[in-house]
Image: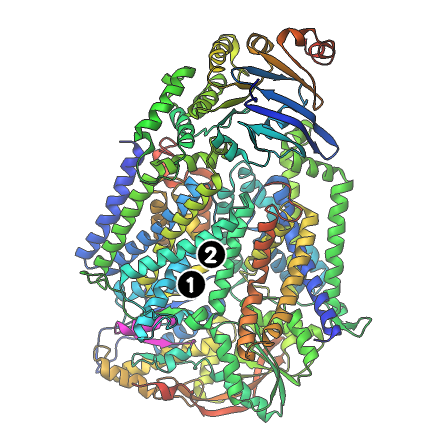
């Protein structure tokens, strides 16, 4: 099999006495959705930060597109094509929806240091941005102030921003949270398609979505991956049932 | 420079540092708990000094004067907190800067309106005046030793207050998590008033103690304010320990810079140039220190919060 | 007293018959009336106004404005007074750096500037100007006198210090110009410094027999208190600024016995001075300070020129100013070729009279003293 | 047209019409006062780019204001005394030409802002406020104790510098020069805010994380805007020195930094015309209140307090409403 797009090997990270990641290994292959689940406090966000670049692991490596990117920061990983959405929306709340998406397009263009022409009149950027908005179904909200969006709409906007970057892999931190049933069904359908453009590492609490979408699932408990496998394997896994699903339901 | 002189300069640096700590402690406390940048801290220092001078003139008692300074500054603190400051906690730093800048104007000219344009008299009491001979033969002013003592006591008192008392628990809670103190059933509004008054009282105490060996005049608070900010930023804003470390570092740097730099430059320069350049550099030294500390540690020595 | 009111001094006296009735002279007074330096500006203003009031004249209009001790504000006020109030004469500035900002520009625009306090060397030498008169002293004068006094008092090894800014450099240069002994040490302190422990330790270790210092305003008060408390006890010498009537009360015992140099003191024995001191005390309820005496002399100089010439006749008016034909509270007073004073500079000592700290005359440091920059002035 | 654009238009025209009236009415001081407003507004526009757009609360902008001032003072004083600025390795003469002085002021401020910004931007929040203050104070004390150019006394220039084809000594002509510059810089500033760079910077102010995630370095955005901001404030410093024909270390003092910041906050942070409204109001207050009482600072303080507490968003925010902020 070809080398995975994104792989994490034996990552460790501790904060004082607290071990947030213990020998974590997982990978993301072409065309798949790999879901990462685990109870609250299992270290999912810490792991995501180490993958996206905000946090350096104490040991272990992160590889992306065949390169060791452990020492690279968020910006460099983003420039290589790692698209990310945040659990808590990181959006420019005072700006319009369109401006937020254009920021992504601008980042992808690699030329943010242009000072005099209005950015909204840049046709190429605008097209990229509007396409992304259309794909997540936010075209009508383009000119709204972002802080006026509903919680779910902000989630959609997060995804739209990531789309503008045409990434080689997505890392999505709970994109379904707060979406409501119809919203999350729509997003589920959308992600289902999206995996063919680029694989998705999906952190999600919505189990219906996870079971519907994931090619593989990894379960993180107290900083360790206790199991990785297909949906059925995970459903059947006794340790997972005890440690995680049993608690949840 | 002889060893004895160097030792004396080190003591001076320590003493200056403790003096700075007295002025900085309240500022850092208020910032730590309420996240407030209070430019008017220097005005509270001035109010303390003026109250002390007025009471000392009327009563002749230094002790009474010091108590008056604490009371007056705390009272002014409560007044300002209730009328103005509490509306600023939720605002950003810019609004706080502008509002407390406005308070400086009001306090300064208000004081001048009350007390006139000329400096006031405030002197060291007889029982604390004059030098004593320390082991090693250094003649050192008793009053400055007293300031070191009081400063260290205040530091100890603050540590105990924060570590051991109920108020301290609330203060620590307020520093780390504002919602938690509400959950603990603490009256936040009153806690903030108390902390602000405590910070003001510390400024007032410093004003009285330091005013006795300096000039009690309108505008005396501003240079103090800048220095206090330098100190707490070096130490890490909100940290009492940091304020203490920062003050001593600044005190030593400033004093030793003034004492040593002109001589140092004299080794390879004309004396007149050495004096001039050495002095110029020594007056910039604490700002250089602050810039270096922040470049190396962007949140100060003991700072956690960015 | 109302600020900025056009103080037309409408005394009951009607213009006496026969006197040349001219347009009133408009004076713009820019001085420091707020903040920490306000005491000096208030004293100058009060002295100036007292002289006008005593004269009973109705021919002087004064516009008073506060410069906040900021040079750019002073410049703005000068512009306003020249362009909008159309004053003929400017005066009042306390600080050298503000005077440097205002005076050259004002004289270049054909306005007369009478300096009641600051006398930077740049305006006494090459930068002298026919329209610029200094009624106080050239900045070096009192320091030179302190050096001369140190010689006569037999001081042989002085430690000298001043703030690190131009007036401070001038002070040390002035002292050294006259002083013949050795220097035990020389320090430039930070402007606005309030703690002098480090300097005091160096003084104590230096083996000096005396200390000369120039630390104006709050710096001097701080230094004196800390010096007294240090127990060093060497004789202090300094210019009058740190022993001025208005701040002595704040220094207290720490200043007692110190010799300082001044061109004026309240016990100078001449009728003009006696009248001035009594009138000032009656009017304002406090003893006059050095700065008040300078403000008073400035006004009287102006009045003397007005009595001789009309302001519209510039040359005659300038000549009348140069003549300095007025009864100065300092006794002898005349202008040198650079229009800076030639005057005696006295030695005073701080004493306590009842509850009040004040100065008494103890001698003359320099007689008919001018300044070294006069030779460079080409006018 | 939003209320804010209407307000801006009225403000801009008023600031133009008033001096013209003063010129007609032969009130030259009113022209000088207007020029002062225009120049201080320009300094504020500079700071507003860093503060409003970039979220960089700099309490050290007096450094650039002063550097601009000294660029003018040093060049003009050498030209005035016919002594070259330096002779080795090549001769640099002083100059009295405004455009040359402006260029030097802008370049010098840019260099200073590059160094100060590169170091200061390692910190954020209150630490950033204080480290910029520290750099300002360093320059202040340096200027006070550096004897070559007058130290605390500053430098006086006897005749205002020249501009080709104009008589700068005529108040109205000098005003027009300054007004034109302010207009040009406001235009530039508006375009900057709407540009790709402005979009990224504005987003970095609100969420640094997001900007990194799309592959843009917030540090570079901030450093760039800090340099541009310093350049504009430096240019204002050169004009201010020319207005007063005088430069001194007080231009470098922390009070000056504070005042420039007051203009911005008073007018409305991140509003295009905020600094213009702020500087106008401040000078107006200074001029009117200064005449009322010896203790006029008390009233000034009370008024400022009132603005912070009750008129959020500054003058423009209050008059034009919250809408329209940030484009």
What residue does disc 2 label? Answer: D255
Give the residue displayed 25% in from the left and 80% down from the top. C16
Residue C203 percent coordinates (x, y)? 66, 78
**Chain of the residue that carries numbered disc 1 in the rendered image:** C
**Chain of the residue that carries numbered disc 2 in the rendered image:** D
Residue D222 on the magenta segment:
no
> Which region is colored magenta?
C100-118
Q: Nearer the viewer, residue C39 or B226?
A: B226
Residue A178 percent coordinates (x, y)? 54, 15
Is residue C109 shown left or right of residue B183? left
Category of crowding for the residue at label 1, using alpha-carbon neighbours closer than 10 angstroms: few (below 14), some (14–19), many (at least 20) = some
* Numbered disc 1: secondary structure: loop
Q: Is residue A106 above or below residue D296?
A: above
Q: Toward which corner of the image does residue C202 lie, by quadrant?
A: bottom right
Q: CA distance from mark 2 to mark 1?
A: 10 Å
Residue C105 on the magenta segment:
yes
Q: Nearer the viewer, residue A151 or D310?
A: A151
In the current view of this chain or complex, which residue is farthest to the right?
A: B135
The dot on residue A34 is none
Q: Nearer the viewer, residue B175 or D239?
A: D239
Residue D158 percent coordinates (x, y)? 30, 71
Q: Is residue D23 above or below residue C140?
A: above
Q: Is residue C340 above or below residue C291?
A: below
* Numbered disc 2: secondary structure: helix
What residue does disc 1 label? Answer: C70
């Amino acid at each position: 099999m070809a080398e995975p797009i994104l792989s994490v090997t034996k990552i460790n990270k501790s904060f004082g006495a607290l071990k947030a990641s213990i020998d974590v290994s997982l990978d993301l292959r072409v065309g798949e959705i790999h879901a990462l689940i685990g109870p609250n406090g299992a270290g999912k966000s810490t792991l995501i930060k180490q993958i996206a670049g905000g946090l350096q692991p104490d040991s272990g490596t992160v590889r992306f597109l065949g390169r060791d990117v452990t020492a690279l920061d968020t910006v460099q990983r983003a420039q290589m094509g790692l698209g990310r959405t945040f659990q808590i929306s990181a959006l420019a709340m005072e700006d319009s929806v369109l401006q937020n998406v254009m920021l992504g397009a601008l980042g992808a263009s690699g030329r943010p240091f242009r000072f005099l022409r209005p950015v909204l009149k840049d046709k190429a950027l605008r097209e990229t941005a509007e396409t992304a908005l259309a794909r997540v179904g936010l075209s009508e909200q383009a000119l709204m102030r972002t802080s006026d969006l509903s919680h779910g709409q902000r989630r959609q906007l997060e995804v739209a921003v990531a789309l503008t970057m045409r990434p080689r892999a997505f890392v999505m931190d709970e994109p379904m949270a707060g979406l409501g049933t119809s919203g999350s069904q729509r997003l589920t359908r959308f992600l289902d398609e999206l995996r063919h453009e680029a694989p998705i590492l999906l952190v999600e609490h919505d189990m219906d979505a996870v079971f519907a979408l994931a090619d593989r699932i990894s379960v993180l408990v107290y900083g360790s991956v206790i199991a990785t496998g297909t949906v059925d394997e995970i459903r059947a896994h006794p340790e997972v049932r005890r440690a995680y699903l049993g608690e949840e339901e | 420079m002889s060893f004895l002189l160097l030792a004396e300069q080190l003591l001076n640096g320590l003493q200056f540092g403790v003096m700075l700590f007295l002025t900085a402690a309240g500022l850092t406390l208020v910032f730590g708990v309420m996240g407030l940048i209070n430019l008017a801290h220097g005005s509270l220092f001035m109010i303390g000094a003026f109250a002390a001078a007025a009471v000392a003139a009327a009563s002749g008692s230094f002790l009474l004067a010091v108590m008056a300074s604490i009371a007056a500054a705390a009272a002014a603190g409560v007044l300002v907190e209730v009328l103005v400051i509490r509306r600023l906690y939720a605002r950003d730093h810019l609004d706080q800067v502008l509002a407390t800048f406005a308070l400086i104007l009001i306090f300064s000219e208000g004081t001048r309106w009350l007390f006139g344009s000329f400096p006031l008299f405030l002197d060291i009491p007889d029982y604390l005046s004059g030098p004593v001979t320390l082991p090693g033969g250094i003649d050192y002013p008793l009053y400055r030793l007293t300031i070191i003592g009081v400063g260290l006591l205040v530091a100890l008192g603050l540590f105990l207050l924060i570590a051991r008392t109920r108020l301290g628990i609330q203060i620590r809670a307020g520093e780390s998590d504002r919602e938690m103190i509400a959950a603990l059933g603490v009256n936040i509004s009153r806690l903030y008033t108390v902390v602000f008054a405590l910070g003001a009282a510390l400024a007032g105490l410093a004003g009285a103690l330091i005013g006795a060996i300096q000039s009690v005049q309108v505008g005396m608070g501003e240079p103090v304010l800048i220095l206090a900010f330098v100190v707490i930023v070096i130490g890490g804003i909100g940290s009492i320990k940091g304020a203490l470390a920062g003050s001593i570092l600044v005190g030593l740097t400033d004093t030793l810079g003034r004492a040593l730099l002109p001589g140092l430059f004299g080794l390879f320069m004309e004396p007149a140039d050495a004096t001039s350049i050495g002095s110029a550099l020594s007056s910039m030294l604490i700002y250089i220190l602050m810039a270096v500390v922040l470049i190396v540690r962007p949140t100060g020595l003991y700072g956690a919060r960015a | 007293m109302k600020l900025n009111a056009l103080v037309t001094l409408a005394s009951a006296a009607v213009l006496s018959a026969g006197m040349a009735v001219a347009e009133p002279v408009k004076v713009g007074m820019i001085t420091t009336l707020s903040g920490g330096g306000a005491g000096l500006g208030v004293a100058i203003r009060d002295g100036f106004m007292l002289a006008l009031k005593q004269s009973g004249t109705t021919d002087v209009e004064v516009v008073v404005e506060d410069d906040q001790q900021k040079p750019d504000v002073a410049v703005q006020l000068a512009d306003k007074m020249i362009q909008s109030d159309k004053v003929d004469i400017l005066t009042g500035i306390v600080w050298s750096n503000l005077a440097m900002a205002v005076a050259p520009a004002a004289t270049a625009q054909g306005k007369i500037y009478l300096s009641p306090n600051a006398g930077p060397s740049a305006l006494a030498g090459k930068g002298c100007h026919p329209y610029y008169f200094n009624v106080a002293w050239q900045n070096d004068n009192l320091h030179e006198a302190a050096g001369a006094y140190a010689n006569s008092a037999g001081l042989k090894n002085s430690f000298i210090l001043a703030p690190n800014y131009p007036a401070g450099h001038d002070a040390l240069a002035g002292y050294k110009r006259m002083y013949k002994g050795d220097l035990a040490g020389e320090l430039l302190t930070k402007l606005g410094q309030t703690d002098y422990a480090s300097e005091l330790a160096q003084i104590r270790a230096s083996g000096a027999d005396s200390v000369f210092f120039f630390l104006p305003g709050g710096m001097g008060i701080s230094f004196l208190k800390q010096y007294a408390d240090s127990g060093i006890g060497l004789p202090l010498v300094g210019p009058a600024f740190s022993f001025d009537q208005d701040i002595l009360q704040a220094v207290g015992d720490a200043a007692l016995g110190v010799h300082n140099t001044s061109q004026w003191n309240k016990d100078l024995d001449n009728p003009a001075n006696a009248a001035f001191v009594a009138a000032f005390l009656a009017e304002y309820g406090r003893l006059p300070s050095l700065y008040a005496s300078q403000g008073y002399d400035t006004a009287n100089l102006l009045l003397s020129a007005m009595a001789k010439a009309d302001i519209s006749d510039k040359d005659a008016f300038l000549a009348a100013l140069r003549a300095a034909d007025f009864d100065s509270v300092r006794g002898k007073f005349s202008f040198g070729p650079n229009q800076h004073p030639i005057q005696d500079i006295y030695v005073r000592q701080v004493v306590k009279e009842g509850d009040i700290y004040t100065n008494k005359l103890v001698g003359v440091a320099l007689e008919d003293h001018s300044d070294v920059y006069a030779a460079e002035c080409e006018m | 047209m939003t209320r804010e654009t209407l307000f801006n238009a009225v403000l801009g025209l008023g600031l133009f019409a008033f001096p013209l009236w003063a010129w007609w009415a032969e009130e030259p001081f009113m022209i000088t006062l207007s020029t002062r407003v225009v120049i201080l507004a320009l300094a504020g526009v500079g700071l507003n780019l860093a503060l409003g757009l970039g979220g960089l609360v700099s309490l050290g902008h007096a450094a650039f204001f002063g550097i601009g001032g000294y660029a003018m003072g040093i060049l003009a004083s050498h030209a005035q005394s016919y002594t070259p600025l330096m002779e080795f390795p090549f001769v640099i003469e002083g100059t009295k030409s405004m455009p040359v002085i402006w260029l030097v002021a802008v370049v010098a401020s840019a260099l200073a802002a590059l160094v100060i910004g590169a170091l200061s931007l390692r910190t954020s929040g209150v630490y950033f406020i204080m480290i910029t203050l520290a750099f300002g104070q360093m320059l202040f004390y340096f200027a006070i104790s550096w004897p070559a150019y007058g130290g605390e006394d500053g430098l006086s220039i006897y005749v205002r510098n020249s501009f080709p084809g104009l008589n700068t000594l005529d108040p109205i002509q000098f005003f027009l020069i300054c007004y034109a510059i302010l207009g040009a810089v406001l235009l530039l500033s508006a375009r900057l805010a709407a540009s790709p760079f402005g979009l990224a910077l504005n987003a970095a102010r609100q969420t640094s994380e997001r900007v990194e995630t799309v592959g843009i370095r917030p540090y570079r955005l901030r450093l760039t805007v800090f340099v541009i901001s310093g350049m504009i404030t430096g240019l204002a410093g050169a004009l201010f020195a020319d207005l007063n024909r005088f430069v001194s270390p007080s231009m470098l003092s922390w009070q000056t930094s504070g005042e420039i910041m007051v203009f911005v906050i008073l007018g409305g942070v991140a509003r295009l015309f905020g600094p213009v409204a702020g500087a106008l109001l401040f000078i107006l207050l200074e001029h009117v209140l200064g005449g009322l009482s010896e203790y006029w600072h008390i009233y000034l303080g009370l008024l400022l307090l009132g603005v912070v507490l009750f008129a959020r968003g500054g003058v423009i925010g209050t008059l034009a409403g919250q809408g329209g902020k940030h484009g």
